[in-house]
Image (cartoon, grey):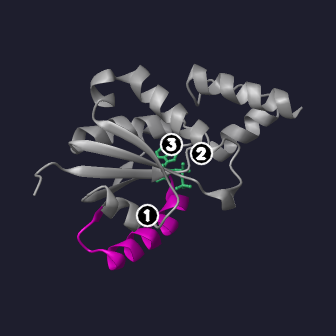
Amino acid sequence: MSTERIGVYPGTFDPLTNGHMDIILRAARIVDKLVIGVARNIGKGPLFTTEERVEMVRQEIDAADREVGARVDVRPFDNLLMHFAMSVNASVIIRGLRAVSDFEYEFQMAGMNGRLNPNIETVFLMATDRYQFIASRFVKEIGMLGGEVSHFVSPRVAARLQERFAKKA
Ligand code: ADP
């Protein structure tokens, strides 16, 4: 059996924000290998396709830290999170926690996932204060209305948003 500690950080990442990146870089310090699971999440009607979101996450990690990038895998998934975590031999699921509003949903999800497989622990990383208020949903709203998103996402993600909304206009 491998002694390598593998973590899964699942999300929709529509689009990847500075808050997500902060969690990724911090999570990479507590596991040997990090698998970022990009949820297809058709129900949420994502702005970017799964392939675009996977590509965005990959690009940002490689641009932020190549050494960390070598230990991070970015993969799409559309099955049950617990099954995805088991398929990559993960022992931890990482989630970011912002305000109180995240708590109830995350608490329920962690509880139910714990029932599905008690050997995989959910670990929460508290959002860093300056990223506390960043949410993909608001970034999209601001972008759609022509506002400045550069405080919340990388320049590359900002350019993609601009391009997407220019097409829609
Ligand atoms: P989901 O659809 O699973 O909520 P998201 O992409 O919105 O996917 O978020 C993925 C994870 O990242 C969640 O655990 C969420 O709480 C966390 N997260 C989102 N934004 C931030 C942020 N600004 N700081 C810390 N964690 C965050």
Q: Considering depth in this image, is 121 or 34 the residue closer to the camera?
A: 34
Residue 89, picture quadrant: bottom left
Give the alpha-carbon distance from disc 1 to disc 2, as whole Å.
16 Å
**Residue drawn 55% across the image and 60% down it:** 101
User: Sequence-wise, which precedes: disc 2 or disc 3?
Assistant: 2
Q: Amino acid at mark 3?
A: Gln
**Label of residue 132 in the image:** 3
Give the alpha-carbon distance from disc 2 to disc 3, as whole Å.
25 Å
**Residue drawn 12% across the image and 53% down it:** 2
Q: Secondary structure at mark 1?
A: helix
Q: Which residues are magenta?
A: 96-121
Residue 167, picture quadrant: top right
Describe residue 72's horizontal placement relative to residue 3 as left or right: right
- Disc 1, ligand 1: is the CB inside 8 Å? no
Q: Considering depth in this image, is 78 or 148 the residue closer to the camera?
A: 78
Q: Read off the residue under disc 2.
A: 50
Location of residue 112 with respect to 46 vertically, above or below: below
Describe residue 115's horizontal placement relative to residue 19 as left or right: left
Quarter of the image with the N terminus is bottom left
Q: Amino acid at mark 2?
A: Thr
